[in-house]
Image (cartoon, grey):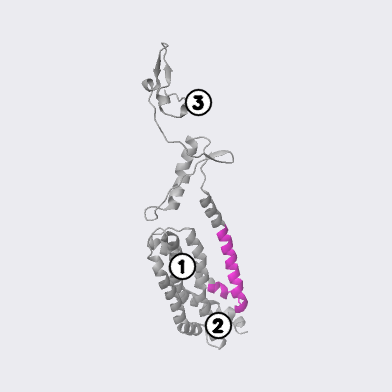
Amino acid sequence: MKLRVMLRFPPVDKQALDNLHAMPITLDNGRSVPFSTVAEAVYTPGYAVIKRTDRERIHVIGAEVYQDEADVETILTDMRNNVIPQLEVQFPGLTVKPGQSRQKQEETMSQLWLYGAMALLGIYALLAVPLRSYTQPFIIMLVIPFGFIGAVAGHLLLCIPLSLESYFALFAVGGIVINDSLILIAQSNKNMQQGIPAIEAVMLAGKSRFRAIFLTTITTFAGLLPLLSTQGYDAEKIMPMAVTIAFGVLFAFFVTLFLVPAVYVTFSKHDLKNISR
């Protein structure tokens, strides 16, 4: 059986450790012996500073994670599901919360999807007014999800986990990839206004705009290659954004050339009256 006893010396006797070793201990027979004769002192570091928040003692625990060896999100998920519940049961009254930076990150993520939805609605409105169509903005914006797919595929290919920077770049990809679809649809509309059938109008638009679409995509991808090959700690913040934009634009390029024209031909009959106005 272990009995934990806490003793405090007067302030005057705390100046030297010799006072602890020489402290007299009275035995059962009335004799006094030094403390070091009957006990052994074990020295452990104490808290340099005690911090409190809402009148509760807190302790900040942090670690540096190398992305090449571990995934931060996987570690946090495992801690929340396995480690933290066991600690809270083992030590009643213990509460484990994420740090301020992590809390801000989670709050930003929750707001990011709201702002992203508002941005998509704004893009749709800006496209619908000049095109005078309800369906063509959807056709143009059809490449946005495929840009997201390409971005995720790029992360998997390079073994880079999705981060907050990746999600920010996803919405940037959405604004970039619709440019190729927009110029393709605009040229197809001009061809149809001249009385050219929908299928032929799309083929002619693809031939005339292929160079612009291809150059836009390849220059964007090539311009990001130096960032993709960057190594070091500072590159950990830039790499997810570069991967998201590069592979999102590259994958959306093929979708623009094949899927968008097919969908455009399908709905061109319904929009022919609006296009000819």
Residue at 44%, 78% in the rendered image:
215
* CB under 8 Å between discs 1 and 3: no
* CB under 8 Å between discs 2 and 1: no
Confirm whether residue 134 shows in the render.
no
Q: Which residue is mark 1?
A: 245
Viewer-side label of 2, 3: 3
Marks counted in the figure total 3
Q: Which mark is residue 80?
A: none
**Distance between mark 2 and mark 3 Cα atoms:** 91 Å
Q: Earlier in the sequence, mark 2 or mark 1?
A: 2
Q: Which residues are magenta?
A: 111-140
157 vs 209, left or right, is left
Up/down of 20 relative to 142, above or below: above
x then y, percent, for residue 219:
43, 75
Crowdedness near tag 2: few (<14), some (14–19) or many (≥20) residues, C-alpha within 10 Å: many
Residue sitting nearer the eye, 47 or 247: 47
